[in-house]
Image (tube, grey):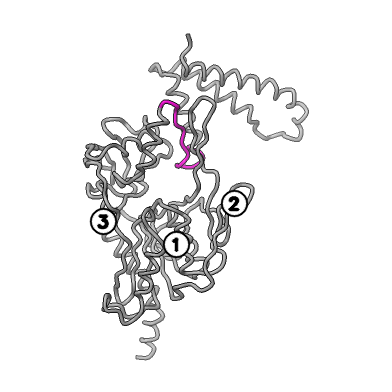
Amino acid sequence: MLSRGRQIFLGLSLATLLFVAAGRMLAEQRRQSDAGEDSLFKYLAVFSEVLSLVDRAYVDELEDETLMSGALEGTLDALDPFSLFVPSDQVASFTASREVGVRRSGLLVLKERGVAYVAAVEEGSPAANAGLARDHILSVIQGRRTRHLLLHEIQTILAGEPGTEIEVERIYQGQKETVRFALAEYSPLAIELTAKRGVGVLRVPTFRTLAAADVEVLLDKLAVPNTELPELEDGGKLVVDLRGAAGGSAETAYQVGGLFAAGELGALRDRSGDLRTFDGGESPVWQGKVVVLLDRGTQGPAEVLAAVLRQSADATLVGDRSFGHCGRQKWVELSTGDRLQITDAFYTGPDREPINHSLQPDLWVRSTFASAETEEDEALERGLDVLLEDEEVEERQAA
């Protein structure tokens, strides 16, 4: 009896041949108008031929399910790193892991072109305390090479029971190092308002637990004088630090944006148009000057807020480019019981451009292999320079 994987393989091959046979009858009619254009049928035929060749000739004998899973993962990898294929026998475990998310490890791990890497890590999490950071490549996890693991398998491992010891091999600055940490429930760092050089600095470490009401309370504290922040000298300037902020709710990001801007803030759009729009209030709580700090770990809702602040609150973006993805993921169940997770819509800024590419800063402070503290200090100082530049110019002119 044929294995289930071989049945799928042969079924796809047969479907390909049927498609090609039917397509040939139409090909002659369209040959002149379609001259020079590649046909979908051609790619299906090549796909079938490659799978068949690998199945027969590769040095190691491979299971058909392994081949098909890898092929499907490669297809989805061409879309974005959040699109997944989950085999039917792993749907239950992955569904449970989605409920846990990053809250036991702090790691947002993605794969692109077969390489697993840290897209973001929450401050104060077990992974962060072990020294893992954004852009670290994870080559091995729990003794298994990540190149041979599907993304959902990696995410399931990182959503294990509290107390589970995790061992990963990371590659950083060309050096391999083994890192160990234990999964644990932890409290993400809260949003924080401090002052530096007389200016307020609003640090948003994550959107996972953020509420717009929390931000509004802190904005109310920017009145000068402020007994809680005696070093605050100018309540009309603010740095919003979104570096490393990933995940959470895009709706929350729009609510926070409404504290800074009025009118249309953006929309959720699919290929047919707007599915939902988001608006700010008539009178924003904050109407001062704003600088936003971002880096490659700024992802999802944080990118929505950065786009709103730039386009509707005249904010200046300082730092490195953002990650470049804020979409809505949809689960699709296949007839085989397997599942696909695909991005079916993107959130936008006020300009209605989908956030499916990186936000580019107005003032670049590129990430380096220096320590995170050095990077953060440099970007923050440059952001403060932007806010204080006009004031310092006036002081020099007066002198």
Mark seen at residue 361:
1
Measured from the top left, where is residue 103 in percent x and y? 32, 46
Note whether 330 is above or below 188 in the view shown: above
Determine which quarter of the picture holds residue 108: top left
Q: Which residue is mark 2?
A: 275
Q: Is residue 237 left or right of residue 377?
A: right
Q: How far, Cα to Cα, is label 3 from label 1?
A: 21 Å
Q: Is residue 79 magenta?
A: yes
Measured from the top left, where is residue 245 in percent x and y? 37, 55
How packed mark 3 is, by other alpha carbons closer than 10 Å (few <14, some 14-19, many 20 or more), is few
Q: How far, Cα to Cα, is label 3 from label 2?
A: 42 Å
At 45% from the left and 65% from the top, the residue drawn is: 362
Mark seen at residue 397:
none
Q: Amino acid at mark 2?
A: Leu
Q: Which residues are magenta?
A: 77-89
The quarter in which the C terminus is drawn is: bottom left
Q: Which residue is mark 3?
A: 371
Between discs 3 and 1, the one toward the N terminus: 1
How packed mark 1 is, by other alpha carbons closer than 10 Å (few <14, some 14-19, many 20 or more), is many
- Secondary structure found at label 3: loop
Q: Nearer the viewer, residue 174 or 76?
A: 76
Determine which quarter of the picture holds residue 293: bottom left
Between discs 3 and 2, the one toward the N terminus: 2
